[in-house]
Image (spheres, grey):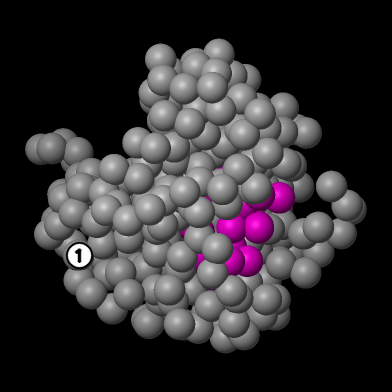
C-alpha cells in the first residue's frame, strides 16, 4: 500500500462517482458531483426508533451516501452507529423518519426486499457460512440472481486474490481478515446498488485493516456507494467522502472526511486529540 492511497479521497475525487447510479460491481466510473443530502442515492432521513417496544436509540438521525462515494459512521461505544445501519437496512421499525434508495421510499420494505432492490449488507459478526467453502459462500451471494454470475465471481477473485487460492477451503478455517473478504465478496455477488459494511475491520490487524480499506476504495471506484460503520475512526475518515459522528443516537458532527479530521472538537473528543 502506498503512502498516498487515501490522500485524494473526498468530494473532489471525481473518479469514484457514477452519475448514472448503476452501482454495479465492475461498472465504469463517471465524473463527480458534490454531495447533495436531499437527493442522495441512499438516505436514512430523520430516523427515530429502537428495538421492539424498547426506548428509542436513534433520535432524528440522518445518514446519506451519494453515488460512488464512501460515507462512514463513527462515534463512541453505544452511540447508535450499528443501530443506524440496521435501521437503514430495515432490521428495526422506525417511529419517525424514512429510508429512500435511488429516489424510492423503501421505509416499509423488509430486509429481504431491500436486498432485491439493490442493498448489499455485511453484518459485523456471523457474516459467513463457516462449514461451506469460500466458493460456496460466494455462490450463496448470488441466490437472488437468475443470470450467469461467473463474471461477477471472477471480479470478486480479482479484488480478493487470496479467495481464489482458497476457494475450495472451508470459510471457517480462514483468518479473520480473509473471512471479512468472503463476507464482502458474497455481498458483491448480488451486484448491489449500494454496499453497507458494519465494522468491517473489527478484530483484524492494522496491516489487514489497511488492505481492506484499499479494497473498499476499489469497490467505490466502480461506482457503488459504500456506507460503513467503523470503530477505527481516524483511518475510516481518511478514506471517507462524508462522515457522520453520532452521539447518543443523534448527529453530532457531519462533514467531509477531511473536514472532520481537521475539526479540533472532533479530534479531541473522538480521535484522541
Instruction: Inspect the magenta stretch and tell me whether residue 131 lies in it.
Output: no
**Which residue matches tag 1?**
106
Is residue 201 rendered to the left or right of residue 205? left
Residue at the right extreme?
3
Q: Nearer the viewer, residue 30 or 233?
A: 30
Locate residue 51 relative to residue 220 in the image: left or right.
Answer: left
Reply above or below: 261 against 178: below
Left or right, 148 with respect to 184, comes to: left
Q: Residue, x 37% and y 81% (percent of image)?
A: 38
Q: Position of residue 131 (x, y in %)?
A: 41, 15
Between 118 and 244, the one nearer to me in the picture: 118
Give the residue displayed 37% in from the left and 68% down from the top: 42
Measured as percent of width and height from the top left, residue 222 is found at 58, 66
Q: In which quadrant of the rendered view does residue 264 lie?
A: bottom right
Which residues, given as a range, are shown in magenta?
Answer: 214-230
Residue visible at 28% across and 78% down in the picture:
103
Task: Point out residue 56 in the picture as x, y percentages from the top left corner.
Answer: 22, 46
> What residue is shown at x 57% (from left), y 52% (from top)?
155
Seen in the picture, residue 249 relative to 180 is either above or below; the reply is: below
- Is 220 included in the stretch rendered in magenta? yes
Q: Is residue 39 visible?
A: yes
Disc 1 crowd, CA 10 A, few/some/many (<14, 14-19, 20+): many
SS class, disc 1: loop
Q: Position of residue 70 (x, y in %)?
A: 56, 62
Q: How many marks?
A: 1
Q: Is residue 98 above or below residue 208?
A: below
Residue 90 shows up from this direction: no
Amino acid at each position: 500500500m502506498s503512502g498516498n492511497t487515501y490522500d485524494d479521497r473526498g468530494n473532489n475525487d471525481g473518479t469514484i462517482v457514477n452519475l448514472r447510479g448503476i452501482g454495479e460491481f465492475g461498472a465504469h466510473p463517471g465524473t463527480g458531483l458534490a454531495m447533495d443530502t436531499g437527493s442522495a442515492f441512499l438516505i436514512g432521513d430523520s430516523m427515530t426508533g429502537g428495538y421492539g417496544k424498547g426506548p428509542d436509540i436513534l433520535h432524528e438521525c440522518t445518514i446519506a451516501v451519494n453515488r460512488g462515494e464512501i460515507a462512514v459512521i463513527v462515534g463512541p461505544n453505544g452511540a447508535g452507529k450499528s443501530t443506524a445501519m440496521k435501521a437503514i437496512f430495515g432490521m428495526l421499525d422506525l417511529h419517525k423518519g424514512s429510508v429512500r434508495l435511488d429516489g424510492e421510499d423503501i421505509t416499509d420494505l423488509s430486509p429481504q426486499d431491500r436486498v432485491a432492490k439493490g442493498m448489499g449488507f455485511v453484518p459485523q459478526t456471523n457474516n459467513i457460512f463457516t462449514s461451506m467453502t469460500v466458493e460456496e459462500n460466494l455462490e450463496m451471494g448470488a441466490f437472488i440472481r437468475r443470470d450467469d454470475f461467473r463474471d461477477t465471481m471472477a471480479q470478486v477473485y480479482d479484488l480478493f486474490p487470496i479467495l481464489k487460492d482458497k476457494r475450495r477451503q472451508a470459510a471457517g478455517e480462514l483468518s479473520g481478515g480473509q473471512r471479512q473478504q468472503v463476507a464482502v465478496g458474497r455481498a458483491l455477488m448480488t451486484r448491489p446498488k449500494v454496499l453497507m459494511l458494519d465494522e468491517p475491520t473489527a478484530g483484524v490487524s492494522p496491516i489487514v485493516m489497511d488492505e481492506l480499506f484499499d479494497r473498499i476504495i476499489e469497490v467505490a471506484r466502480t461506482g457503488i456507494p459504500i456506507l460503513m460503520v467503523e470503530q477505527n475512526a481516524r483511518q475510516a475518515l481518511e478514506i471517507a467522502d462524508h462522515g457522520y459522528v453520532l452521539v447518543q443516537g443523534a448527529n453530532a458532527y457531519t462533514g467531509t472526511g477531511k473536514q472532520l479530521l481537521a475539526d479540533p472538537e472532533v479530534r479531541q473528543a473522538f480521535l484522541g486529540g
